[in-house]
DNA sequence: CTAATATCAGGACAACTGATATAT
DNA sequence: CATATATCAGTTTTCCTGATATTA
């Protein structure tokens, strides 16, 4: 809280933070390069991930979750439905709503794409770090998790 | 290279990779939440970062770097110029070209925005990790850098 | 004359706002 | 009747392709 760079930590903490920030950017980029998603816009991919994580939902609920207008979400859902990634079914209890859910095909594609990214990282860790270094990395991950808690 | 999950590493390596992948995603998200960029589209922000990193360049060179058409880059540059973020000057040696460079104001904004993200991370490290844990983290960062080399 | 640079014109797409039909 | 859901219509933005003027 007294170095000249305006931070609240020591100079060594600042250097550590810069190293970590740049490293996170690079790792994220490398992960993204593996196992490409389909050619849908990011917002549509986000909808698929949301459906996978939270289960079936209505158009309006999805729009709220993704910070989009319901009209835009309708169009996005229509595109995803045309591509066979989601399916709509009328809600038996509320005739206004349509329940959107992932198709099994899409669920499998998401799993495969995730596995591709995961496998690259897994292979790289196995190839470049010794068993002891892997233990050290596991310990470091516990430290890093503390940084994002709460 | 013989576990049932189809990976090439051991089960423990796979678990490590999954932990790390999720952690990277969360850290990246937290960093992004700090110090928001202006309301320019991502491709225009990318142009600013490119100019900051590599120095002044022509419209065509920028278009090649960012994987855009020169016509689209022209429009992007016009928007950035209207916002006072870049400035164009004719090339004295080649009358066809216009050299695009960052304004001092923009360079300062980029620095400030980066510092905001950096400071959050720096403060969090200082607040949540003991000096010994910070040393451990520095060692772990050296390990992680090996994963992205080459 | 050929190649490179930048721009003008028009189109496609994904987000937006406003208005409307249907169901609770 | 008031509220919520979904959609129809039109606009804005950002990318694209095709064609053109200028300079090397």
Image (tube, coloured by chain):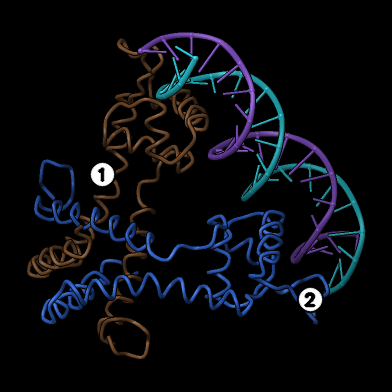
Chain colours: A brown, B blue, C purple, D cyan
Q: Residues within 10 Å of mark 2 (few under 14, many from 20)?
A: few
Nearest-to-viewer mark from 1 and 2: 2
* Element class at badge 1: helix
Image quarter of residue B98: bottom right
Q: Residue at x 40, y 36 (%)?
A: A64
Residue under label 1: A115
Q: B93 or B30: nearer the eye?
A: B30
Residue B135 falls in image quadrant: bottom left
**Do the residues at pointers 1 and 2 share their chain?**
no
Rate crowding at label 1 as few (under 14), some (14 to 19) or many (20 or more) other CA atoms within 10 Å: some
Instruction: Identify the residue position indicated by label 2 in the image.
Output: B90
Q: Secondary structure at mark 2?
A: strand
Q: Quadrant of residue B31?
A: bottom left
The chain under label 2 reads: B
Give residue C18's position: percent from left, percent from top: 63, 30
Of B121 and C5, which appears nearest the observer? B121
Q: Is residue B101 left or right of residue A114?
A: right
């Amino acid at each position: 809280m007294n170095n000249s760079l305006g931070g609240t930590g020591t100079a060594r903490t600042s250097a550590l933070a810069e190293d970590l920030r740049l490293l996170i950017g690079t790792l994220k980029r490398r992960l993204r390069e593996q196992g490409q998603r389909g050619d849908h816009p990011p917002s549509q991919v986000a909808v698929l991930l949301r459906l996978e994580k939270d289960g079936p939902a209505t158009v309006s609920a999805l729009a709220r979750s993704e910070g989009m207008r319901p009209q835009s979400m309708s169009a996005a859902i229509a595109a995803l439905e045309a591509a066979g990634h989601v399916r709509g079914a009328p809600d038996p209890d509320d005739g206004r709503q349509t329940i959107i859910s992932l198709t099994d095909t899409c669920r499998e594609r998401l799993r495969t794409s995730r596995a591709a990214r995961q496998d690259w990282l897994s292979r790289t860790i196995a190839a470049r770090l010794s068993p002891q270094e892997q233990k050290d990395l596991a310990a470091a991950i516990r430290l890093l998790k503390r940084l994002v808690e709460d």
